[in-house]
Amino acid sequence: MLTMVMWIGLAGLLSHQEKDKPAEGFIVPYRLSKTQHIVVRAKVNGSAPLNFVIDTGAPAFFIAEEAAKKAGITSDEKGWAVIDEVQFEGQLKAKKVKARIETPFQLKGMNGMGLAGIELHGMIGYSILAKYEIRLDLKKDHMIWTPLDWTPPEPKGLGGVGKKNSQGATLELLGSFMQGLGGLTGGKAALYPKVQGFSGLALEQKDGKVVVSSVFVGSPAAKAGLMAGDEIKRIKDEEVKSLADAKRKLSMIVALESVDLSLVRGKEALTVTLKTAFGF
Amino acid sequence: MTKYILSLSVLLFIILPDTIGETHKAPMEILKTGHLRIHVKINGKGPYPLVFDTGAPLNLLSNKIGKEANIKRKPGRSGISLMGPMGEADIASLEWSGAIVQNVPAMILDHPTIKALSDHLGPIEGIVGFPFFARFIMTINYQKAQVLLEANDYVPDDLMKNTMALMFQRNAKPLAPPNTPAFGLMLSNDPDPKYHGLVVEDVLSGSLAEKAKLIKGDILISVNQRWVDSPSLLFRILAEQWSKGAVDLEIIRQGNTLHKKVEKPIENTP
C-alpha cells in the first residue's frame, strides 16, 4: 500500500519534468559499430562524449570504471552512482539517472581488441530504455525517443541483492561471444583513424611537370614558402611521376606531419619543409 | 508537372504493396531482471522462449531447438566447444508474431548464461539479436510490453567479415577531407577540455570559413547536432551531413553558443 503511494508520487514527479517534450519525440543519433552494436554518445555530468551500447540485454545503465573516474563520478560502496545529467547527442537530456559503475568483461575484451572500431564506455539498459518509446530504423542515422508517462519497476539482479557485481553477472554472460571473436581475429584495430593533413595548395600539370597552381594565403603551404609556379620534383624523398602521383603522395600525409618537398623555382632547386595542419 | 505526378504514382505503386499493413505487434514479457522474453517460431516449430537483446550481434539458439527445428549447420563451421556441440547455421525462417526473416544467421550452442537465466527466470532457449531486428523498423515500448515491427530493406553486414576488415585496415589511407576546394578552417587536433569541441586556430583570409564569419578561438561543438570532438569524427560527420545539404554548425564563442549555416564548398569557389 505504501509502495503504491510512492509509485504514484514518483510518476507525478516524472510527468512534471517532461512536460516540454516534443510530441514527435527526441532525435537520438547513433552509430553502428563494426561489431554491429547500436552505439549512442552521451555526456555524463558534462564529461567528454562517451560511447554507450543500446542494450535491452543489460538491466541497468552501465558506465565503465575508467570513464566514470575521468568524468569525476564516484560510486557508493555497492557500485551505484546517481548522475545529475545525462546529455545525449541530439536533444535529449535526462536528470538524476542511476548508473552502475562497473566494467563488464566483454566490454574490456572488445576495447582491448579495438573490435568495435570505437572505444565503448558502457551500455544503456533497461533502467533507461524502459522510460522511452524507442524507434530504430537501420536505414536512418538516428533513433526517435519519446518519453513514456510511467515509472518502470526496479530490476532485480540474479545474485544476492546489493552484492557488488550481482547485476553485472547476467550481462557479462550474455555478451561473452565477443571475446571469442577477438581471440579468432587477433591483433588490435586502430580506434581513431588518422586524417589527411591540410596544406592549402592546388596543383596542375604543365608541360609534363607537376606545378603549384595556387597557394592559399596563410595556409601551411604559404608558411612553408611554396609559391605558385613552383615545380614539385620530390615529396618525402620520393620522385613525383605525375599529377595523380603527387596527389596520391600528398593524400598519405597526415595532419601535423612535417614533410620535405624538393622544388624547382625558375632555375633554382630548393627544398622546403611543409608542416600540415588539421583543417578542411 | 504531369511528369512528376506520373512518376510519383509509379513510385507509390511500387512501394505500397510491400509496406502497407505490414506492421506487426509483437508482445514481450519484461522479466524481473529487466530482460525481455519473447516467443519465436523457428522453421515453423515452436514458439520458443528467447531473450530479445539489442546488444547481441548474433542470434543464439540451443541445441534442443537446433534438433527440433531441423537446423542444418554450415559444414566446416561446426564442432565441439567447451560448452558442448556448437555451430553456425542459416535459419530458414525466424518468426516473431508474424514478423518473419528468412535465411538469418545464428549460432547453435548451449550457453551457460542462458542456462543460468533459465534456471532463475523460467525457460529461455536462446537470444534474438541484431541479424533479426536490423531487418525491421522497430518501435520498442516497455510500458505496453510490445515491439512494433515493420519490414525495411536493410541488409546487415556479415559480422565476421566486418571484424576481419577492421583488423586489416591498420595501414589504410588517412581519412580525406569531406570537401574540395578547401573551406579554409584550421582546427586544434585535440578537443577543448571544457567544451569538448575543436578549437579554431586559423581562418584563411578570403575563404568560405571567413565568409561564414568564423573567427580564431571559436570552439566547434557540433555539426547538425552531432558532436565533433575529434578530427576523424569531424571529417566523417561533415561528409555525411553535407551530403544532405547545408549544415548547422554549433559554436561556442566567448562562452556563448552560436549557430552558423554552412554550405558545402563547390568547385569554382576560391
Image (spheres, helix red, strand yellow):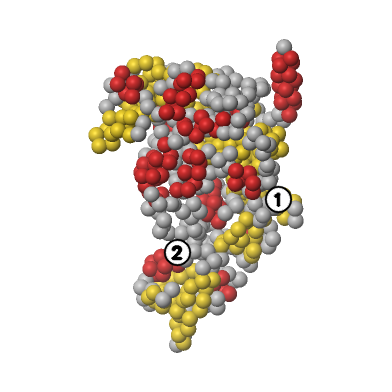
Q: How many marks?
A: 2
Circle number at residue B166? none
Q: Look at the image and tell me whether residue B243 can be seen.
A: no
Taking the spot 60% from the left edge, 46% from the top edge, the residue there is A67
Crowding around mark 2 (Cα neighbors within 10 Å: few <14, some 14 to 19, many 20+) is some
Residue type pointed to by label 2: Ser
> Residue A21: x and y, percent?
68, 30
Q: Which of the 4 image quadrants contains residue A124? A: top right
| Mark toward the viewer: 2 or 1 | 2
Identify which residue is drawn at 35% across, 34% down. Answer: B82
Residue found at the far left of this picture? B75
Q: Is residue A113 above or below residue A206?
A: above
Q: Position of residue A83 (x, y in %)?
A: 68, 37
- Circles 2 and 1: CB distance less than 8 Å? no
Q: Secondary structure at mark 1?
A: strand
Residue bearing mark 1? B258
Under circle 2, the secondary element is helix
Front-most of residues B3 and A237? A237
Q: Is residue A243 above or below residue B125?
A: below
Gap between marks 2 and 1, in whole Å? 33 Å
- In this view, which residue lies farthest toward the top? A1
Q: What label does residue A251 carry, if any?
A: 2
Residue at 37 percent of width and 71 percent of height: A242
In the depicted structure, whether residue B156 falls above or below residue B138:
below
Quarter location, residue B16: top left
Position of B8 with respect to A216 (left or right) is left
Give the residue displayed 54% in from the left and 20% down from the top.
B31
Residue kind at label 1, given as amino acid type: Leu
